[in-house]
Image: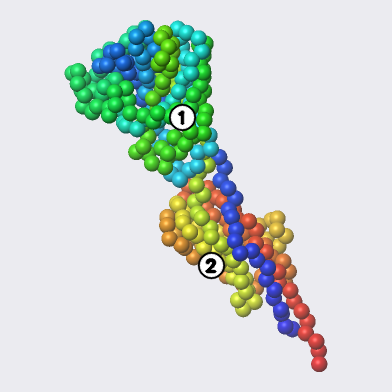
Amino acid sequence: MKKIISLVYLLTLQLVSSSQTMVTFDALKDNTIYSDNTGSSNGAGDNFTTGSTSSAFRRALLMFDVSSIPAGSTITSASLTLYMNKTVSGPVDVSLHSLTSSWGEGTSNAGSGGDGMGVPSSAGDANWICSFANGVGGCTISWAINGGDFIAGASATTSVNGIGPYAWNDFLLIADVQGWVNNPTNNNGWIIRGDEITTFTAKRFSSRTNPVTAQRPQLSITYTAPLPITLLYFKASVKNQDAELSWKTAQEINNDYFEVEYSRDGSSFNVIGKINAAGNSSQPQYYNYHHRAPGVGKHFYRLRQTDIGGQSTISYIQTVTLTEKTPNLI
């Protein structure tokens, strides 16, 4: 009896997308700088302040460490929540601006009620003139421009009025966070500015050391981690009446192994083979698996990829159809 085998396959496939993850970060550091008391700070105080007093204005500095987000992740949402605990005016727009220089939080502490004026900067504090003060009235490192080095365009703006929590959300804020994930050395946080034109518009917010934990700044981020591999193709071919499966990756990140899963009905799959992966690679990698004599009928194949942390992704299903034909008798 002679067998005639036909094969049906797809040339490319995509992996099932990884799920989104939401994380919330507490602030790493914060501070207040003062245009009229240029050598003052409030690095360790319970609050930070923005906006204008009678003759000057205050700006707050705030930074979060987002380095725990896996490299290569895509940021899909980001929201900053601050709690305003004191106000001297009506509604005011408060904006976030991405800082372009690093800065410090020292041990300066204006104490309860002294946030509006600050106290002399301690070593490592930021103030109006210094990104890092030396603790004796001068700078270890100065800002390029007094009042902080930052991007003029706001990353997000929210109107604040009465006491309570407020959130800042904008696609530019997402872009800031994405930039920090892509290049952590660019993460200098934000400078927070209130109304610096109208007098008596100051707004005070709870800092990261505020005794009321629920009022401390929080940055909530949703991200999609990168898939551990980029799969260029998954092919099937015939060799000596057997099924030959092959696939190629463009890159791999912490990739542990592949399992070839097989089914006769396209629903219930069993593992028929395991192939160790390259692990980490930016170069193309080639793999293959030989399935001997799967038999007459329709056969279903898929790949299960598992990373070193035990997380798995599954490919789309590929099909192979083997038919048997009885030759004419002479």
User: Residue 239 location, x and y as percent?
Assistant: 60, 76
The residue depicted at 24 percent of the width and 27 percent of the height is 142
Looking at the rendered image, the quarter that the N terminus falls into is bottom right
Element type at mark 1: loop
Q: Which of the two marks, 2 or 1, is nearer to us in this view?
A: 1
The image's mark for residue 326 is: none
Q: Residue furthest bottom?
A: 330
Label 2, label 1: how far apart the Cα atoms are: 48 Å
Q: Pointer 2: residues within 10 angstroms few (<14), some, or many (20+)?
A: some
Let me know if residue 214 appears in the view: no
Read off the residue under disc 2.
Answer: 288
Q: Residue furthest front?
A: 197
Looking at the rendered image, the quarter that the C terminus falls into is bottom right
Amino acid type at mark 1: Ser
Vertical side of 144 occupied by 86: above or below = above
Q: Pointer 1: residues within 10 angstroms few (<14), some, or many (20+)?
A: many
User: Residue 194 location, x and y as percent?
Assistant: 43, 18
Question: In the image shown, does 18 or 154 lie closer to the viewer?
Answer: 154
Read off the residue under disc 1.
Answer: 155
The residue depicted at 51 percent of the width and 18 percent of the height is 159
Element type at mark 2: strand
Vertical side of 51 occupied by 5: above or below = below
Q: Earlier in the sequence, mark 2 or mark 1?
A: 1
Vertical side of 182 occupied by 202: above or below = above
Where, by quadrant of the figure, is residue 125 drawn? top left
The residue depicted at 51 percent of the width and 13 percent of the height is 91
Question: In the image shown, does 279 or 282 lie closer to the viewer?
Answer: 282
The residue depicted at 67 percent of the width and 64 percent of the height is 319
Vertical side of 85 occupied by 74: above or below = below
**Is residue 266 found left or right of 110 in the rendered image?**
right
Amino acid type at mark 2: Asn
